Image (cartoon, coloured by chain):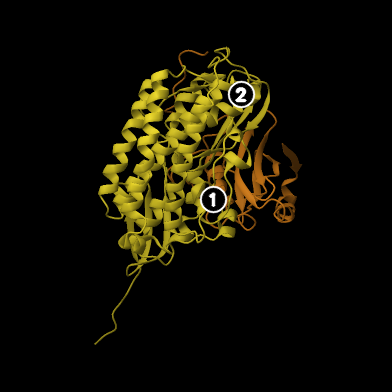
């Protein structure tokens, strides 16, 4: 019998694949079912936001960043507003800062819920998906009540927030938090100790702490590798230094650790919102800022902790009403850099688990 | 909070190898185009995860010969950032193992984030604010 001829198999996963969460394409070079090389290919959603911003006045920038990371638009609003306020020497009133924190943490919960639901769905568990979206709905309703829209808010503005929150909003948020806390236990009961889930996630796609830092990983992914670094604590912005909360970390840096870190983060977010609601100061929600804002010449970058990691906008201003250059430091773009290293040697089915725990958001990867 | 430091393009790699001991984390790097000064400025944000010390490292490159050594060997995080800067500004990173376009299609002509970039499909804004 003659020798069997073997060759490397190239598989294109995506851009239309349910587990690549958007329009990511992975070119997988396979030996049987084992991945020898994975090459991410993105840019399918590139809209040239950074170029567009060079021709927009400052107030026009906020709605654009809503559409970068559309699952955490509030966090993006905050990240883009902070450096401009720094350049223009604007100090928002304390009530506005508290409202910002409430909104960002609620958005973090909503974003983690979408992540958790789709991640579990990728691994074959359908129920958590339904549960997560059931709980995400009241958050969207809360945003609708306060802001008017459900996904892209354009709410956090230079000098404060667009509108004050009502007593009904505060009442409903408190009711939601007490309803939501036991729901996290429900997700955990479904997944955390589930043997199938454990088999799919334990010791899969390990990132060591040193490697994670070298690759510039941030957010829950970095903390899952055991690095205790949360920008809300490390470089406090807004009023995050006023709240007490834990920074959950993992030990191994595998998919399961990344899962449990995000679950625990939701609990911490609930704590922060409760504290912010309890300490919500009275007063104005916005100070008057010229519509045609002209920040001073200079540059500013304020790193913030978005649900995906370090999110920041680097502004270079020449003192005109448009930024000379705006660079978006997108967390999932930087977190995905390590994907090629992580996937080597794993099987195709693990790609889904690994990619799921990276929590990619193609809107901000491609920009 | 953050310090600033300007260094020459030729010394970048040697200098960064020394800096890596303090600043183990590279959150991002990017470029800014200044056509009137005929330079492209590279900005590296370096950070220490232990002390949160931050350094903004700046390198000026001539616009007509924008070449600099790649920092992948120092911080692997530089990989995609350098590809993006190559994609958008045309800066060549010497020693980068895989310098391809990252966001734009591979057959794209020109470098869009340069200030003098034009494209036949670009429409002039009817109103300027």
Chain B as rendered: colour: orange
| Label 2 chain ID | A
- The answer to whether one can see residue A57 in this image is no
Q: Which class describes the residues within 10 Å of circle 1: few (<14), some (14-19), or many (20+)?
A: many
Q: Which class describes the residues within 10 Å of circle 2: few (<14), some (14-19), or many (20+)?
A: some
Q: Secondary structure at mark 2?
A: helix
Give the image quarter of residue A141.
top left
Q: Nearer the viewer, residue A126 or A245?
A: A245
Q: Which residue is mark 2?
A: A85
Between marks 2 and 1, how big is the CA–CA gap? 27 Å
| Left or right of B129 in this view: A294 | right
Q: Earlier in the sequence, mark 2 or mark 1?
A: 2
Instruction: Verify CB contact (< 8 Å) between mark 2 and mark 1.
Output: no
Q: Which residue is mark 1?
A: A217
Q: Nearer the viewer, residue A279 or A323?
A: A279
**Residue occupying the point 53% across, 51% down:** A223
**Residue occupying the point 65% across, 50% down:** B49
Q: Secondary structure at mark 1?
A: loop
| Label 1 chain ID | A
Where is residue B112? Give x, y as percent.
Answer: 51, 35
- Compared to residue A66, the image places residue A338 above or below, namely below
- Compared to residue A314, the image places residue A92 above or below, namely above
Where is residue A340? Give x, y as percent.
Answer: 46, 58
Q: Quadrant of the N terminus of chain B?
A: top right
- The answer to whether one can see residue A18 in this image is yes
Have a look at marks 2 and 1 and say if they share a chain.
yes
- Compared to residue A67, the image places residue A217 above or below, namely below
**Residue occupying the point 57% across, 14% down:** A287
Q: Residue A339 has which mark?
A: none
| Left or right of A253 in this view: A70 | left
Q: Which chain is yellow?
A: A
């Amino acid at each position: 019998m003659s020798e069997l001829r073997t060759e490397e198999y190239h598989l294109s996963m995506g851009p239309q694949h349910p587990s690549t969460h958007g329009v990511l394409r992975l070119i997988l070079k396979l030996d049987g079912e084992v991945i020898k090389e994975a090459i991410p290919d993105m840019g399918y959603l590139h809209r040239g936001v950074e170029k567009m911003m060079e021709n927009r006045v400052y107030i026009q920038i906020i709605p654009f960043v809503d559409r970068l990371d559309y699952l955490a638009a509030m966090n993006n609003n905050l990240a883009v507003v902070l450096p401009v306020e720094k350049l223009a020497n604007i100090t928002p009133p304390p009530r506005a800062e508290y409202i910002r924190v409430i909104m960002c943490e609620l958005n973090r919960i909503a974003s983690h819920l979408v992540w958790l639901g789709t991640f579990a769905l990728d691994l074959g568990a359908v129920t958590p998906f339904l549960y997560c979206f059931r709980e995400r709905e009241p958050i969207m309703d809360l945003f609708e009540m306060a802001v008017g829209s459900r996904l892209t808010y354009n709410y956090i503005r230079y000098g404060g927030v667009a509108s004050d929150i009502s007593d009904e909003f505060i009442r409903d948020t408190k009711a939601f938090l007490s309803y939501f806390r036991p729901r996290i236990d429900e997700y955990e009961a479904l997944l955390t100790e589930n043997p199938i889930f454990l088999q799919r996630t334990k010791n899969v796609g390990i990132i060591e702490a040193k490697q994670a830092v070298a690759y510039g990983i941030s957010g829950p992914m970095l903390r899952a590798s055991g690095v205790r670094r949360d920008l809300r604590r490390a470089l406090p912005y807004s009023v995050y230094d006023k709240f007490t909360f834990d920074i959950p970390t993992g030990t191994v840096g595998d998919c399961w650790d990344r899962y449990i870190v995000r679950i625990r983060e939701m609990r911490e977010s609930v704590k922060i919102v409760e504290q912010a609601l309890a300490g919500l100061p009275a007063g104005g929600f916005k100070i008057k800022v010229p519509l045609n804002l002209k920040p001073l010449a200079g540059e500013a970058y304020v790193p913030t902790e978005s649900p995906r990691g370090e999110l920041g906008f680097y502004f270079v201003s020449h003192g005109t009403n448009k930024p000379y250059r705006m660079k978006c430091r997108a967390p999932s773009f930087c977190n995905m850099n390590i994907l090629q290293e992580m996937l080597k040697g794993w099987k195709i089915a693990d790609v889904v688990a690994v990619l799921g725990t990276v929590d990619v958001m193609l809107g901000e990867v491609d920009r | 909070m953050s310090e600033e430091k300007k260094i020459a393009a030729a010394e970048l790699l040697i200098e960064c190898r020394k800096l890596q001991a303090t600043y183990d984390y590279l959150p991002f790097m990017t470029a800014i185009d200044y056509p009137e000064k005929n330079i492209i400025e590279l900005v590296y944000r370096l950070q220490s995860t232990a002390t949160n010390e931050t350094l903004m490292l700046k390198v000026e490159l001539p616009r007509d010969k924008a070449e600099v050594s790649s920092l992948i060997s120092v911080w692997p995080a530089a990989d995609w950032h350098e590809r993006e800067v190559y994609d958008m500004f045309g800066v060549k990173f010497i020693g980068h193992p895989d310098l391809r376009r990252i966001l734009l299609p591979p057959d794209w002509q020109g470098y869009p984030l340069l200030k003098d970039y034009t494209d036949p499909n670009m429409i002039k804004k009817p109103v300027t604010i």
